[in-house]
């Protein structure tokens, strides 16, 4: 209950500020942009000072991802395509880290790649965080045996398509310039037939839709995805059609995923900032519209 | 011949890709692989073309001392520096035992990525939140029916996709009403609308692709219809 009281008192503070803005707006004095920016700074910073546990419930879309992952047996090979870069990392990186941690703890074999130039760097960063976990560190996992980073390949959807024939044709070497045939993890991996699941973390094109169109439909690949909140609505038709086995959308999807896997990470705390900023935007919409309606009636 | 040869290449490549989807066997499967390799190579060249173009544009700006030429100089220095470091560390990693990547932890390239590129690009993107808030306050008005519907849907989506509205009603009920509502909006109205848009786009792409493959649309080779 304490959390509710803190939340309510914070909302009261924000509300008072908003009432003042509303008062000025109704009086015909639209506040300057810099004050709106300041309000947002204050709103986004609030979770730094307050501990709150927002009521997160795992949605069916995220539950489907979790069920797909948990159905994999130890030793199963998962291809992870990191199709994003730093601007989208706050939403997608927590999903990647949570997944990598879970996968390495459960002895899944991970093959990272990227259709975006900075995707493999994001993969390395996720791996670094996962490998620092005490349980995973105790396993003494080896590069090339338990996980590998194939790096970036240009060609967008053509890379996905060509990998249906041969992974080696697109990645003759990995990111460390080790020949494909010399990597123990990739022994016997010719194409998608030897892959148990493709996980795609995507912030745009090429991304989940390209994976669906070129790998799922054509090569019957099992695909689960994590998308930015902006991109997720475009993937829902494919989710409903069963072409994607679960979808994590935006920060909330990441927080739900962390909760479901019991791998608490950054999304669980980032979601608070997003929650408060959404609240501020919603209040701004209400204030702007009510003031506009009132002034229009007066005229 | 300057126009005929590109047209022939376009037609053959277009037909091969279209046919090989349905008949992935000899000779279409092999031809598709070859054309796919070509695409990868051409796109790799396009990256360098972009780099050279950026060098040309920014170089000219510096040479003529146009407004903001100092920023152009920073662009060139950082770009050339990053490429040089990446190439140097790439070759050094190849010869190391065991081999390492220029992206690995501890490399200068990774340092640039982690401590310069990442925070700078994230900051640029994060600034959207400020502009969206300002726009929400100043411009997002329920001026007509469509705008009102958009506004209401946006309101519930924003409140439902994060546990905000559910947090507010949590002292009264344990049911996450707004999360469920936003999930319903995404699964039904949004999915339906997206599907309609996707089918429309696909039909449009098919018709314009056919025009290109058949040589009716020739604007990509300069001139014509």
Image (cartoon, coloured by chain):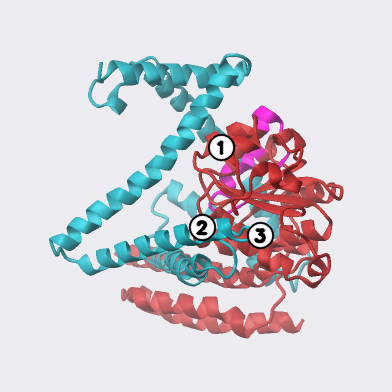
Colour of chain B as rendered: cyan
Q: Helix or strand or loop: what does disc 2 sit on?
A: helix
Residue at the image point whose x is 19% and y is 62% from the top: B62
Residue B63 vs residue A68: left or right? left
Binning the other alpha carbons within 10 Å of mark 2 as few (below 14), some (14 to 19) or many (20 upward) gives many
- Which x, y percent locates residue A116? 52, 49
Left or right, residue A79 beside residue A227? right
Residue B178, can we see it? no
Vertical side of A10 occupied by B55: above or below: above
Relative image position of residue A11 (x, y in whole percent): 59, 79
> What residue did someone put label 2 on?
B90
Query: Between residues A211 and B104, which one lies in front from this camera angle?
Result: B104
Task: Name the colour assigned to chain A in the rendering.
Answer: red
Badge 1 sits on which subunit?
A: A
- Residue B211 to residue A282: above or below: above
- Would you call the spot at circle 3 few (<14 residues within 10 Å), some (14-19), or many (20 or more)? few
Answer above or below: position of A119 versus B111. above
Cβ atoms under marks 2 and 3 closer than 8 Å? no
Split into 4 quadrants, where in the image is the C terminus of chain A? bottom left
Disc 3 target residue = B98
Q: Secondary structure at mark 1?
A: helix
- Label 3 and label 1 in one chain: no
Position of B189 relative to A146 (above/below): above
**Discs 2 and 3 share one subunit:** yes
- What span is in magenta? A216-238
| The magenta stretch spans residue B206 | no
In 3D space, how far apart are the residues under numbered discs 3 and 1 (Cα atoms)?
28 Å
The disc at residue B132 is: none
In the foreground, A104 or A296: A104
Q: Nearer the viewer, residue A97 or B149?
A: A97
> Can see residue A264?
yes
Q: Which residue is mark 1?
A: A159
């Amino acid at each position: 209950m304490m959390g509710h009281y803190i939340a309510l008192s914070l909302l009261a503070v924000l509300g008072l500020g908003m009432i003042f803005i509303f008062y000025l707006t109704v009086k015909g004095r639209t506040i300057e942009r810099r004050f709106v920016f300041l309000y947002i700074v204050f709103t986004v910073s609030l979770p730094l000072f307050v501990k709150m546990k927002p009521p997160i419930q795992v949605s069916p879309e995220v539950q489907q991802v979790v069920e797909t992952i948990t159905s994999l047996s130890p030793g199963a090979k998962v291809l992870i395509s990191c199709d994003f870069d730093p601007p989208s990392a706050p939403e997608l990186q927590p999903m990647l880290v949570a997944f990598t941690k879970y996968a390495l703890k459960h002895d899944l074999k991970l093959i990272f790649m990227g259709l975006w130039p900075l995707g493999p760097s994001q993969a390395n960063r996720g791996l670094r965080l996962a490998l620092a976990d005490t349980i995973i560190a105790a396993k003494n996992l080896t590069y090339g045996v338990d996980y590998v980073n194939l790096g970036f390949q240009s060609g967008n959807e053509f890379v996905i398509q060509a990998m249906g024939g041969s992974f080696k044709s697109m990645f003759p070497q990995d990111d460390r310039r080790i020949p494909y045939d010399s990597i123990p993890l990739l022994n016997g991996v010719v194409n998608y037939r030897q892959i148990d699941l493709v996980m795609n973390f995507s912030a745009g094109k090429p991304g989940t839709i390209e994976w669906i169109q070129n790998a799922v439909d054509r090569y019957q690949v099992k695909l689960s995805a994590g998308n930015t909140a902006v991109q997720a609505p475009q993937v829902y038709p494919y989710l409903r059609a069963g072409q994607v086995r679960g979808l994590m959308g935006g920060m909330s999807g990441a927080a739900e995923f962390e909760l479901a896997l019991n791998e608490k990470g950054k999304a669980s705390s980032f979601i608070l900032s997003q929650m408060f900023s959404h609240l501020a935007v919603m209040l701004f919409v209400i204030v702007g519209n009510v003031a506009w309606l009132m002034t229009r009636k007066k005229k | 011949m300057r126009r005929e040869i590109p047209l022939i290449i376009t037609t053959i490549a277009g037909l091969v890709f279209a046919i090989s989807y349905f008949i992935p066997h000899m000779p279409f499967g092999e031809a598709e692989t070859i054309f796919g390799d070509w695409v990868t190579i051409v796109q790799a060249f396009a990256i360098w073309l972009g780099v050279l173009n950026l060098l040309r544009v920014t170089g000219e700006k510096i040479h003529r001392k146009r407004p903001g030429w100092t920023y152009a100089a920073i662009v060139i220095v950082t770009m050339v520096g990053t490429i040089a470091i990446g190439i140097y560390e790439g070759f050094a990693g190849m010869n190391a035992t065991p081999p390492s990547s220029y992206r690995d932890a501890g490399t200068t390239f990774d340092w640039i990525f982690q401590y310069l590129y990442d925070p700078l690009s994230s900051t640029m993107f994060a600034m959207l939140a400020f502009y969206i808030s300002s726009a929400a306050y100043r411009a997002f008005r329920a001026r007509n029916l469509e705008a009102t519907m958009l506004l209401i849907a946006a309101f519930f989506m924003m409140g439902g996709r994060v546990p905000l509205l559910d947090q507010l009603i949590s002292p009264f009920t344990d049911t996450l009403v707004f999360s469920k509502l936003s999930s319903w909006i995404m699964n039904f109205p949004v999915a339906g609308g997206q599907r309609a848009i996707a089918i429309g786009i696909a039909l449009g792409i098919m018709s314009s692709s056919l025009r290109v493959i058949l040589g009716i649309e020739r604007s990509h080779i300069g001139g014509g219809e």
